[in-house]
Amino acid sequence: MGSFPSGIRHDYKDAPPAAAVRPLPAWLWFAAGISTPLIAAMVLILVSTGSETAAVPEIDDLSRAADPVVIANTSQTGFEPLIPDRELSGDRIRMIVGRGDSLGEMFRRHDLSLRDLSEMVELPDAGYYLRMLNPGNEIVVTHDTGRVQSLEREIDDFRALRIVRNSDNFSAALVERPLEVRAAGAHGVIERSLFAAAQDAGIGDPLIMEMAEIFQWDIDFLKDVRAGDEFTVIYEEIWSEGEKLKDGNILAAEFINRGTPYRAARYTDAGGAVDYFTPEGRSVRKAFIRAPVDFTRISSTFDLARRHPVLNTIRAHRGVDYAAPSGTPVRAAGDGTVGFRGARNGFGNTVVIEHGGKVTTLYAHLSRFGDIRVGSRVRQGQTIGYVGMTGLATGPHLHYEYQVDGVHRDPQTATLASSEPVYLADADLAAFRSIAAPLWLELDLHRPTEFRATATY
Ligand SMILES: [Zn+2]
């Protein structure tokens, strides 16, 4: 496991970056940006011959190469360097805005000229960004014994405000940071917990949660995950000037749960809608999510060894219990209408949602309710209440029931019958296949074991 040797880089700058990362093939971006099956086939050949370093042209057309969200933040007209070209004399101070900080206080702390500051604040383009500071914003000032030579204020990952001293005044400009989107990947095997495995694999909690959300209709990440389960993610990293800013989107992911593989790849359809699809082109979305507890709030402390088996030992127990801290959001498992909201004997505070087709779900022992009333429409994933221990409960947990015609069923098997799979339309399917084909291969390449999914792709 660990961060991976292969991957793809697309350079958004004219000049090569100074980053000490070895150049990686651009074939995946290349493949993702095309829809011609012939070229896709060529890419597949490159891959299948193991020619990772094959010379593949860089893509000029950014709009085809990466996610539109990223593109929207990059300039099509080239970038100005963030750091002024000419050498500025003086000392450099890097300041991070603290809670309740103002630029005036920060200038005072560093003995910087307040007169310069008031002049800069008057600049038409600068005032807004100098007054509206958020904790964590970074401001870099160069100065000559307090006399400001330049000021740079990070606006977001993509833009900065730059002010420079001219002979008799200051001038301000918004500059865009040169961005690079690199594809990266990671593979992990679960021993103690999903999050420990993610950490071992070198990826952060937000990314592993995003992966868990992709598979939330098929896998109950609080109940189903076992030691030995494996995951692989291919994802974007956003870099600027040799510095990784953040992770981007997951492009493809695989989770092998107790020997059963689940795979999905990201696809943006012609209408701009983004979703994840299986190799067969079926949306990962289903009528019901598996775990109605917001696991992203509790999973970081969740450990396989610390499961609460006691909660499941009551005889004739008709539901599934999720041990979770009080106050953890409880989510509607599917779209529906609130049929009951109130106290119900041993169940304590309870919500029942009617989903149509005689399917109802029940959520019990809630500490309090979400913003719902009887008759309210609720959307899948909407918070309907919070974990608690009202009624007969020995500890905070969610008691969840999935019923068909009043009879309790196993939500997993029953769900399959009640959900209509959504497939990509033919036109999108062809495009999806050509985008996804190299991603499936990339998933295979990052899995050290010889496991091969049984699905055809
Ligand atoms: Zn229960």
Image (cartoon, rainbow, N blue to C red):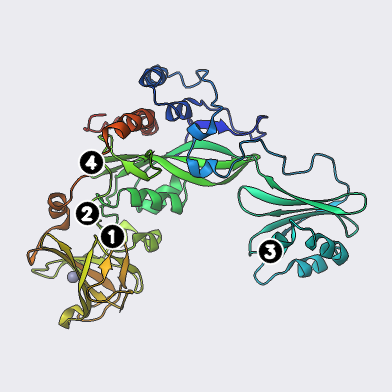
Whether residue 96 is visible here, answered yes or no, is no
> Label 1 amino acid?
Gln
Residue type, mark 3 in image: Val
| In the displayed structure image, the side of residue 72 where residue 194 appears, left or right | left
Horizontally, residue 380 falls left or right of residue 82, namely left
Among the two numbered marks 1 and 3 on one chain, the one whose residue lies closer to the N terminus: 3
How crowded pointer 1 is (Cα within 10 Å; few <14, some 14-19, many 20+) is rated as some
Residue 402 locus on image (x, y percent): 15, 63
Question: Is disc 1's CB within 8 Å of ligand 1?
Answer: no
Disc 2 residue lies near ligand 1 with CB under 8 A? no
| Residue 9 picture quarter | top right
Indicate which disc, 3 or 4, sits on the residue closer to the N terminus: 3
Picture coordinates of residue 340, whole percent (x, y): 19, 76
Mark on residue 380?
Answer: 1
- Dot 2 falls on a residue whose secondary structure is loop
Tell which circle, 1 or 2, labels the residue nearer the N-terminal end: 2
In the image, which disc is placed on residue 287?
2
Up/down of 6 relative to 214, above or below? above
Cα gap from disc 3 to disc 4, whole angstroms: 49 Å
